[in-house]
Amino acid sequence: MIDKFLAAACGPLSGRVRVPGDKSISHRSIMLGSLAAGVTEVTGFLDGADCLATAAAFTEMGVRIDRRSATSLKIHGVGLHGLQAPTKNLDIGNSGTSIRLMSGLLAGQQFSSTLVGDASLSKRPMNRVVDPLRLMGADIQTAEGGRTPLRITPVEQLNGIDYTLPMASAQVKSCVVLAGLYANSTVTVTEPAPTRDHSERMLRGFGAEVLTEDLGAGRARITIEPEQELHAMAVDVPADISSAAFFMVAASIIPDSDIVLEHVGINPTRTGVIDILRLMGADIELQHLREVGGEPVADIRIRHAELKGIHIPEELVPLAIDEFPVLFIAATAAVGETVLTGAEELRVKESDRIQVMADGLATLGIDAKATPDGIVIQPGQITTGDVHAQGDHRIAMAFTVAAALASGEVLIHDCRHVATSFPAFLEQAQQLGLNVKAAH
Ligand code: S3P
């Protein structure tokens, strides 16, 4: 297993790549494909550890999933009530999306289940899903402080609910909406700010009726009726904009770069990274806009540009929630300070992304001040040094991009989880011209 990257400065990036499939959509394709009637064919699937953990969990519950290649699957759906009791704990590793979404589905089953994860997941808050599920009547036990494992015991019925999310979280929204398939009456979820809507789109693709009311400023109220049969469909997973973001920032900050990232999902609830980079002055062109299986897709051309520091608009935060580690690297190469506020959710991701990034940037000679809900970054020369990703895939990849402008070598520790979302990262980074290799 590769656990360290050694990265350094490089020349301009060039070429075209298709980064791996979207993590959020890949997870949902397994979940809904498993619960549908019929065979769902998935192409462009992300064969990263997180999505494979979701697949393994559904296999454990009796779903046959044939892997025709690394990225193409056939899921033999068992219908809404066809899952079987697992004979062991469902171990979903590092994956917050698996545990949050699956807890909603499992709360409605007529069997007990226990969801466990790795050390990082065991530190992350689960009460955000347990609270609304308990309000619906679910029986869920957690470890102290609302941590994993989650032990789910069947209840006679799950009640409908009209729930307002306390935080902008697509995982919590999706959990409650998916539990709604098993409730005894209507489930309505209101979000405080727009969050990714892949669950709603895919449920509609599988034939369910899901109502989305626009509350203004992109916020939505989602309504789902219970006991809707899902019908198998073909899912073509677009490339993950969250993985594309590393190369978008790299090409933006490395002089003379000019690259194209192919077939990237540009769902408007995910494109905050493009909006933020454009506000900073990036040169990003969307080409060949098209729709694939209910999700908008484009090829993205990025050329080097002089970036300027900005105060990132708070309304863009949930729309770029996974891209901040690498956006912080863009800030180091900009003219003027960059300020992020309203982003306390970053502290409960795979690591505390505000603190871990601030620490690593400081090691590399950058003036970065963590605040309770964000960070203030002054531009500067990245220096040589050892940084620690704390097992967080996106932090390992962000520091690889930082090294492209470094005065010497950067050794990045704890990179093993890069495979959760971007198994081909090293190869594709090298293909575009980044100077990075595995280290021992
Ligand atoms: C995800 C939602 C986001 C994101 C995560 C995937 C999803 O989390 O950070 O990587 O697939 O729904 P929150 O919705 O909890 O912010």
Image (spheres, helix red, strand yellow):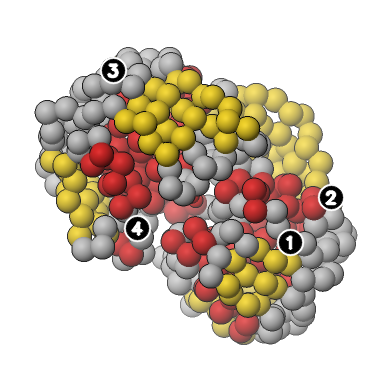
- Mark 4 vs mark 2: give the one in front: 4
Amino acid type of the residue that numbered disc 4 sits on in the rendered structure? Pro
User: Which residue is denoted by mark 3 in the rendering?
Assistant: 227
Measured in 3D between alpha carbons, the distance from the residue under mark 3 to the one under mark 4, in whole angstroms, is 29 Å
CA neighbours of label 1 inside 10 A, class few (<14), some (14 to 19), many (20+): some
Q: Earlier in the sequence, mark 3 or mark 4?
A: 4
- Residue 62, horizontal then vertical, whole percent: 20, 31
Measured in 3D between alpha carbons, the distance from the residue under mark 4 to the one under mark 1, in whole angstroms, is 28 Å
Disc ID at residue 311 = 1
Measured in 3D between alpha carbons, the distance from the residue under mark 1 to the one under mark 3, in whole angstroms, is 45 Å
Disc ID at residue 125 = 4
- Residue 201, horizontal then vertical, whole percent: 51, 26
Q: Earlier in the sequence, mark 1 or mark 3?
A: 3
Label 4 SS: loop
Amino acid type of the residue that numbered disc 3 sits on in the rendered structure? Glu
Q: Identify the residue at horizontal 58%, vertical 27% (top origin).
A: 214
Q: Earlier in the sequence, mark 4 or mark 1?
A: 4
Quarter of the view holding residue 9: bottom right
420 vs 71, nearest the viewer: 420
402 vs 335, nearest the viewer: 335
CA neighbours of label 4 inside 10 A, class few (<14), some (14 to 19), many (20+): some
Query: Would the CB of label 1 be found within 8 Å of ligand 1?
Result: no
Q: Identify the residue at horizontal 64%, vertical 48% (top origin).
A: 315
Q: Is residue 303 left or right of residue 123?
A: right
Disc ID at residue 283 = 2
Amino acid type of the residue that numbered disc 1 sits on in the rendered structure? His
Q: Is residue 84 left or right of residue 25?
A: left
Quarter of the view holding residue 98: top left
- Mark 1 vs mark 2: give the one in front: 1
